[in-house]
Amino acid sequence: MGIRRWIAAAVVALGTSGIVAAAGGDQPSRPNVVLIVADDQHWHDYGFMGHEHLRTPNLDRLARESLVFPRGYVTSSLCCPSLASIITGRYPHEHRIVGNDPPDTPGSPRQSPQGTKAFIAGRERMNRHLDEWPTLPRLLAPAGYKSLQTGKWWQGDFSRGGFDEGMTKGERHGDEGLAIGRGTMQPIYDFVGRCRTAGTPFFVWYAPMLPHDPHDPPQELVDHYSSKTDSVHVARYWGNVERFDRTVGDLLDHLDREGLSRDTLVVYVTDNGWIQDPQSKRFAPRSKLSPYDGGLRTPIMFRRPGTIAPRTSEALASTIDIAPTVLEACGVESPVGLPGVNLLDEVATAARTEVFGECYTHTIVDLDDPTTSLLWRWMVQDRWKLIVPAPPAPGKQFPAWQGRHVDDASRENFERGEPELFDVIADPDERTNVAGEHPDVVARLRAELDRWWDPGVPKPEPVSTSAVPRKPNLLVFLADDLGARDLGCTGSTFYRTPAIDALAAAGMTFTQAYAAAPVCSPTRAALITGKFPARVGITNYIGGERRGSLLPAEYLRGLPADETTVAERLKAAGYTTGVFGKWHLGPPADVPSHGFEASGSIDVNPAQGPDDDPHHARAIARQATAFIAANRGRPFFCYLPLHSVHVPLRSTAELVAEEQRRAAALPGADPREVPEGERTARAVQDHPVYAAMIDEMDEAVSTVLVALEEQDLVDNTLVVFTSDNGGLSTAEGAPTSNLPLRAGKGYLYEGGIRVPLLIRWPSTVKPGLRCEVPVTTLDIAATLVDLGGCPPPAGEILDGTSLRPLLSGTGAIPARDLVWHYPHYSNQGGRPAAALLAGDSPDGRREKIVEHLEGGRVELFDLAADEGEQRDLAAERPERAAELRSRLEAWRREVGAAMPTPNPDPVDPFGPDGLPPKRKPAAAGG
């Protein structure tokens, strides 16, 4: 249900749903959410539920102020599967996290090295099951919510559940997260404060390991409850219940003090029940791990003062309902197919007359087949509760009683395979099995149970039935100054790029890919905004100031704060975002404000790294792999603008020595240079240091791609590899050749703007495809936004075209002009110019004009016949040249392109007066 439909339904249901109108008739605002999950607490162990000894004043207060469902149920009576159901809104047999631990390894105790390794691998597989399902934090993120995990969390690092922040780093129960409630509440209060300052709604997961053992409450509580019971074990458990109650009171008081109570939906539930064994520290039979209400039943509460009317509902409720209820309350559309109902909708709650669940072995038998671990299915309908044992699958055995404390009668019923039927209204402790007296009820409920889930009927894999398909991860490598011919897969016979060549072989190579500009900063601006550099206002590399007969156009020295970046759009769509490498769009301190949550190596200088990592390539790769590992459970955008292979030329001594030997073995080349205007361009690829730098770059790419394999993310990750401009070929000491393409970095000839572009996406792109459609950096940005599911709002401009239709190898994109605007003098010899590649060239031509802004001269080339741009056709086809120039001028007017102006004191742009006073040229910079 969308937000408008939710609002309409809320208005219609005001009289009966328990939702009250806000003051003045305004709709309730998007609430914060605090989800409180008790750990191992019996459904009766509260003052408001009638316990005669327990003091729970804060939970009693919460109940008085809430919509309370005393007949609530968890999906399974064990914490790990139960918590997974709460966060996903799916049953254990759907998300496949059916036990607490992975299978044991026969002959290898868990404490042994082999057993420990197998246990860790098994837990990772369990975590990957959760990765397949959208969680509440992931679903709330596109609506602007920030999320925090505290307390119990089984599924690896908090980020794997989609949380923005958290305490758990990956241990079995929750490691550092377990300090919450038992030692501190401050992480929650700090997070709430940050969100309040930022004006963002928040989602808090508060799942302390309370009253779970160790039952170690303050001594004064032990003393108090010891006067109420003869069992110290019961006294300690009761003391922990009150201890937990105090933390709830502290949390509610904090919301009151901060003035957030009316704006916060508080949800309360337990993960499973508990009956304390009076003779030991363990739980008693018919509680945790059992199919009885002592393990399954829980009160469920929803509080939002002024919006939810406090009352008690006798309707059945389930933890499977928490996800859709929270999503609806937050105005977020629920995934299609969620089995629960919105408990704030009285009509829907009344229409659902039964709840279902399942119980499994503590230790999972088969991680991919829930039926092998299944012990019981159960359901409750009205006053009746049916429990149906599940015998082992043919040829399968499982430790039915491992980790359980089961009474003899229940064990005998299980082993006989006999169902149990209880009247839970008349017999809330489920002491009398009345299945023999009501065979018709058993048959009717058994049919309902089988319609809900019949373990004998195969179900599709969860990944294919997921209501919200996992969005692809997005990984973008942007090399610095890498030429179109500088890779083995694009034609180099000297440079070695095995990892990048393998990437090309596994995906699509775009043979006519172009950078948005002939120097770095404008291309980076285009990639990160999806807009023409001229539209953004960054048309030169930041720091460029050369002048000549013209004064160069003014340009911005940093990305404007009001530009919406690709990272910001993806972040709003639920992606986590990171940038590692060369920013070069203003101060590095601005990076977080442009949508990146993680960053690294953004404030270092190229070639000033340590001797074993001079261009920081290895550091960038390490940072990226850590980011990928930490965020494998949620969609991520990882942007890697490498410092390689920008000058100064420097590499490790070992690689340089190796490449020197290879270069020395090459046959002599003649010519080594070709004319390029007032300069010459390098004509051969044999520079050993540059080759070593390419080796380093390829190694870094390999490291990151291997990380995708290790995290099992290859199939669902779009990988892009490209460069910010053409190779450096015309500056003094230039290291590479772009031939047969003309010129290089700093020029609008093909050598300056043609770049490699490789895209791998195994789920869509067939290996080894080649695409000859002309595309640009702007199209990469449009593709990221498209695949991330975050198109710009109506009226907001993206200048590129999504490449999605081309990636299948069968689609097409509309023909269009490609346009460049460089109103500057480059350090490499380029002069102010503009260019247009026509989208409507006739007769197989590929017509391109280059307009020289100093004198207005226009060149016309047919790249199909003259890729090296050696034959100017403007005099032969003046009308076509004039037409394309007119289109170029119209484009400039449309985007508001800044133009150079005459210099009253013209100078040689590449002489000593070409830069303002007190400035020194940066050789081959930009």
Image: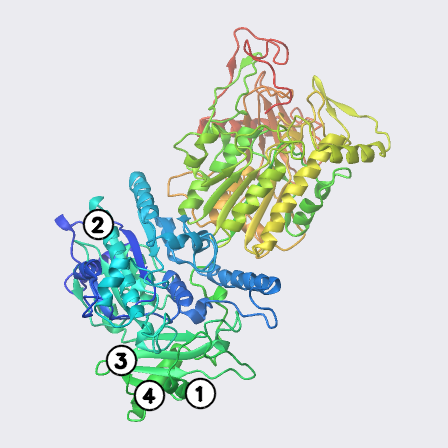
Q: Residue 415: give its label.
A: 1
User: Residue 906: horizontal and vertical position, in percent?
Assistant: 57, 8
**Residue lying at the far left of the rendered structure:** 24
Q: What amino acid is at disc 1?
A: Glu
Marks 3 and 4, Cα distance to the nearest angstrom?
Answer: 19 Å
Front residue of 792/432: it is 432
Marks 2 and 4, Cα distance to the nearest angstrom?
Answer: 48 Å
Q: Decide which of tag 3 and tag 4 comes sooner along the chain.
A: 3
Q: Residue 442: give its label.
A: 4
Q: What amino acid is at disc 4?
A: Val
Q: Decide which of tag 2 and tag 3 comes sooner along the chain.
A: 2
In the rendered structure, the answer to whether residue 512 lies left or right of residue 550 reads right
User: Residue 301: horizontal and vertical position, in percent?
Assistant: 24, 62
| Image quadrant in which the C terminus is located | top right
In the rendered structure, the answer to whether residue 145 lies left or right of residue 620 reads left
Q: Decide which of tag 1 and tag 2 comes sooner along the chain.
A: 2
Residue position marked by numbered label 3 in the rendering: 429
In the rendered view, tell whether residue 311 sits above or below residue 910.
Answer: below
Please name the residue shown 59% across and 38% down the image.
619
Front residue of 18/828: it is 18
Please name the residue shown 69% across and 49% down the image.
502
Residue position marked by numbered label 2 in the rendering: 253
Q: Residues within 10 Å of mark 2 (few under 14, many from 20)?
A: some
Q: Decide which of tag 2 and tag 4 comes sooner along the chain.
A: 2
User: Residue 470: horizontal and vertical position, in percent?
Assistant: 47, 57
Mark 3 or mark 4, whichever is nearer to me: 3
Marks 1 and 2, Cα distance to the nearest angstrom?
Answer: 50 Å
Q: Decide which of tag 1 and tag 4 comes sooner along the chain.
A: 1
Marks 3 and 1, Cα distance to the nearest angstrom?
Answer: 22 Å
Mark 2 or mark 4, whichever is nearer to me: 2
